[in-house]
Amino acid sequence: MPKFVTIGYGDQAGYDRTDASVRDAAHAHDDGLRAAGADMGIADSPVQVRNTDGHGVTVERGSFMASALPVAGFALIEAATLEEAVELAAKTPCAVAHGVVEVWPLRDTP
């Protein structure tokens, strides 16, 4: 089955202004995704890793991406199609709580 990485962006203010029943349904949806085998997590502060030309590793605190909303979490899900993955992502907390979720199809490596 094809795999997809989802990245959720959202903040506490958006979460707090979302009706509790909508949030509860979204969390229940996440519980169902986990039960079906999705790997999910809440994002913490990232680091950037470089090893240019294999000549030494450098690590810097902070993210490379820029967004109006912070990265809130991620998931690795399986779905038959991109459309199904979008449907699954659309019911998650970031999607319903004034945030956004990116869905990235994963391709096999050569």
Image (cartoon, rainbow, N blue to C red):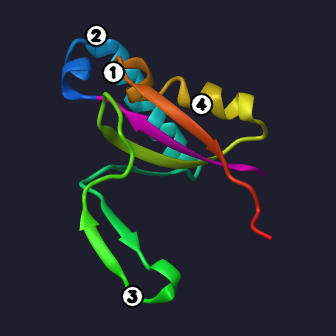
Badge number at residue 56:
3
Which region of the structure is painted magenta?
Answer: 1-10
In the displayed structure, 50 sits above or below 21; it is: below
- The residue identified by callout 2 is 19
The tag earlier along the polypeptide, 1 or 3, is 1
Cα separation, mark 2 vs mark 1, equals 6 Å
Q: Secondary structure at mark 2?
A: loop
Residue at (77, 36) in percent of width and height: 81
Above or below for 86 versus 4: above
Task: Identify which amino acid the numbered label 4 is placed on.
Answer: Leu
| Above/below status of 23 relative to 6 | above
Of 71 and 50, the residue lying toward us:
50
The answer for how far apart the CA atoms under marks 2 and 3 are is 49 Å
Q: Secondary structure at mark 4?
A: helix
Number of other residues with Cα within 10 Å of mark 1, as a class: few under 14, some 14 to 19, many 20 or more: many
- Secondary structure beneath dot 3 equals loop
Q: Which mark is residue 88?
A: 4
Residue that mark 1 sits on: 23
Camera-nearest label, 2 or 3: 3
Amino acid tagged 1: Arg
